[in-house]
Image (cartoon, rainbow, N blue to C red):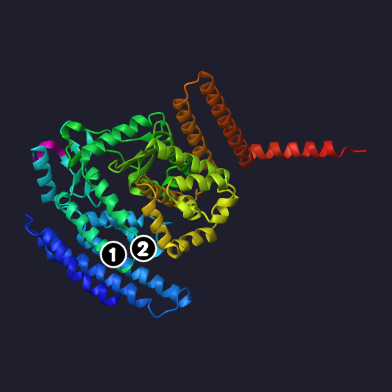
Amino acid sequence: MALRALKFASWTAAASGIYMYGNKFLDPNDFGVVRVGRAIATTAVITYDYLTSLRSVPYGSEEYEFLKSQVHLRSAERLRELCCSNRGTFIKVGQHLGALDYLLPEEYTRTLKVLHSQAPQSTRQEIEQVIREDLGKEIKELFMSFEDTPLGAASLAQVHKAVLQDGRTVAVKIQHPKVQAQSSKDILLMEVLLLVVKQIFPDFEFMWLVEEAKKNLPLELDFLNEGRNAEKVAHMLKNFDFLKVPRIYWELSTRRVLLMEFMEGGQVNDRAYMERNGINVNEISRNLGKLYSEMIFVNGFVHCDPHPGNVLVKKCPSSGKAHIILLDHGLYQVLSESFRMDYCRLWQALIKADMKRVQKYSRRLGAGDLYPLFACMLTARSWESVNRGIDQSPVSASEDMEIRSNAATYLPQITQLLNNVPRQMLLLLKTNDLLRGIESALHTRASASSFLNMSRCCIRAVSTYQRSKSHSLYRRAQISFTEALSLWQINLYELFLWLKGSQLGNWVIGQASFCWENASHPST
């Protein structure tokens, strides 16, 4: 086995070298043997480490678990260094892995999370080159001022604050100049390496990662597509007055340059910022849940990169209302109607702890016999909590630790599931984990109100679907009445929860209990 791990390096080098041969780019650090060799060497070392470090230790023993954790950590650190060195697509994929908190071993997610803050920056000269090539003008011709230091740098682009000649303050998103050319080569290299690793470790099922990159990267690299997504979601969610999406300035936007209205605020996971600025943390968490429930269950058009740098909060000075600012609209998942309905009904079953329907709709979504694991992955709750009802009790520290440790224990089954479920599910799982990370930082995770909002959206979505399929006026009226009754029941239950948690409610409940006691035991 170890010998096979070492031999594969020459084979992958040959395959990758043939593909890379004849490319027109001259930077050897980015496109030559250094870049390809770095990826091959890192993969070979990680593979060899797993093969040799655990070979002589009894499987399942304490020593085995300890050593496995150490190998996970070493491998994650090597992978992080590879991503930082090769940049671009490698960082993007590493960030994706780092977001899968409850699906991958903690050693990987904790180590790879830092990639969100370690993305490379393009130089001033490179920025000027992209703007000159795409807009046909120099920076000084377009802007009164242009800040050299970016507001933020990501794997594919960076954003600068600038002021247009007419005085408008804008955010300028500029693609790293080499990313477009690198992406297809990087994906091919990853595909070759993952295929070879799968030959050594048959349980290693990560080809879904390459397939997702192949599908999504071209869309993310087209900033005109991002602008269209921003306008679509702003229109789609226009009834939420707390949501702000930057306006796009199309006259100065291209596939590699995107000019937007400048908006600023604190990151959505910054509880201290909210407390300093008088922003209600529970309200922000509740509104974020409303946004995503509406996107997922009702509209089927989902912003799939809600990491804290892309979701800001700010208190409006004039109205005093807290706004959620949604940024970076490059990565969206469009859900088919059949998938969306199955997903709605699965969540309804999970909230009601209806295990027969949980099994039914999990199987329809590709989980097969692994439906208990699938339910735990979706909810980030233990199987015991899923059976009891995920809205019955908040997540305890011990349960959270159990879920994270299970990600390492059941890694082969998890990767098998990720290979089997519809491709639409993959970005939803990533989105779920990012949202849970925000809730954990705000200490608002698994509140009853979040499940109530989900229930409302599921009821509306299913009722709208049923009405669209019914040709009977009576049947449509019946569906509408059932929908209204179900929503009224949720509103009543929400009122009860509010009364239960408020001082007025406690006083009312206390008075009612006192009167009941007196009525039950009249004085003689």
Residue for point 50% across, 61% down: 401
Q: Which residue is mark 2?
A: 108
**How many numbered marks are there?**
2
Q: Residues within 10 Å of mark 1 (few under 14, many from 20)?
A: many
Direction from residue 160 to residue 294 in the image, left or right:
right
Q: State the separation of the CA atoms marked 2 and 1.
A: 9 Å
Q: Residues within 10 Å of mark 2 (few under 14, many from 20)?
A: many
Residue for point 26% across, 74% down: 4
Residue nearest the viewer, comparing 279 with 72: 72
Q: Amino acid at mark 1?
A: Leu
Residue for point 29% across, 36% down: 229
Residue nearest the viewer, comparing 46 with 12: 12
Q: Position of residue 327 (x, y in %)?
A: 31, 41
Q: Is residue 117 visible?
A: no
Direction from residue 299 to residue 36 in the image, left or right:
left
Q: Position of residue 118 (x, y in %)?
A: 27, 58
Residue nearest the viewer, comparing 264 with 37: 37
Q: Position of residue 311 (x, y in %)?
A: 36, 44
Q: Secondary structure at mark 1?
A: helix
Q: Quadrant of the C terminus?
A: top right
From which residue to which does the magenta span run? 138-144
Q: Which residue is mark 1?
A: 79
Q: Secondary structure at mark 2?
A: helix
Direction from residue 135 to residue 73 in the image, left or right:
right
Q: Is residue 123 visible?
A: yes
Magenta span contains residue 118: no
Q: Amino acid at mark 2?
A: Tyr
